[in-house]
Amino acid sequence: MSGLRAVYIVGPSSAGKTTLCNALAARLRLPSSMHITEVARTVMKEQGFTRADVHSFAMQHAIVKAQVAKDWEARQNITAENTTLGQPILLSDRSAVDAVVYAALSELTTKSGSTQALISSSDFQEVLALYRSARSTFVLLRPIKEWMVDDGVRSLEDGEHCYAMFVKVLRELNIPYIELGESCRWLEERVAIVRRATVST
C-alpha cells in the first residue's frame, strides 16, 4: 500500500460529487474495488435510517464505521491490475469526515457532544492519519444553486452553510484540501484538476 494515492470527493448534497467520481473512475479506468460509492445510502437502506435521521449520532456513527471499513477493504484489494500511471489509486465518493460535518451542523442547535464523540471514535482515528497524509487528496466541492435536486434521500441542507462547516472541520482536523466551485463547472476541467493534484501529491 506504500504507493497508494487516495482521492476523497466531499461537499454538500447535490454539489456534483458522484458525477465527478464517476468521470474520474472512467478516465482512470479504476476497477469497482478501488471506487468507493453509495456508502451512506447503503447504511440508510440496510439499517432503516431516513434523511430525517441525518443529524442523529447513531446514523452518522454507522456511516463512519461503514466508510472506514470500505476504505480498508479497498486498500487490501490492491493488485498490479489496479494501477494507473504506474500507481494504485483509491477513489471515494465522500469520506468519514462527512459524518463529522453533519454532526457538527446538528450541534449548532443541540449540544450533544456527538461531533467530538465521532472524532474520538477508534473507527475515525484509524483513518485520520491516512486523510492527513500527503498521498491523500481531499477535493471539496462548493455547492452550485441550480444543481440542487431533491431525490427524496439526501438532505437538502443550506449548501453554503454546509460547505462552510466542511471548511471548518477540515481545517480543524488538519486535513489539506483543494476546492472546486462556480469558477470550475465544466466536468472535464474538474477531472483534469483532480488528476493533476493527485499526480503532484
Image: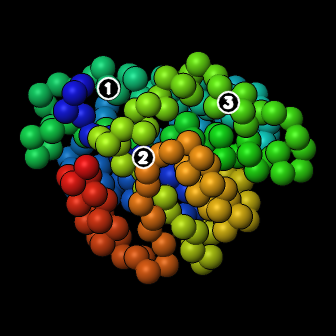
Where residue 71 appears, as percent x and y from the top left, is 42, 29
* Badge 3 density bin: few <14, some 14–19, many ≥20, Cα 10 Å: many
The three-letter code of the residue at mark 3 reads: Leu
In 3D space, how far apart are the residues under numbered discs 1 and 3 (Cα atoms)? 22 Å
Of callouts 3 and 2, the N-terminal one: 2
Q: Which mark is residue 75?
A: 1
Figure disc tally: 3
Separation (CA) of disc 3 from disc 2: 19 Å
Q: Residue at x 29, y 70 (%)?
A: 188
User: Residue drawn at (24%, 34%), measured in percent from left and top?
Assistant: 4
Q: Relative to residue 49, is residue 36 drawn left or right?
A: left
Q: How far apart are the two marked residues, 2 and 1, measured between alpha carbons?
A: 14 Å
Q: Are marks 3 and 2 in contact (CB under 8 Å)?
A: no
- What secondary structure is marked by label 1? helix
Q: Is 6 situated left or right of 60 in this image?
A: left
Tell me which amino acid carries mark 2.
Answer: Tyr
Q: Between residue 31 and residue 182, name the one nearer to us.
A: 182
- Where 70 falls versus 55 (above or below)? above
Residue at the image position 73 percent from the left and 60 percent from the top:
157
Q: Please give the residue where the numbered disc 3 appears in the rendered image.
A: 118
Q: Provide the residue designation for mark 2.
A: 8
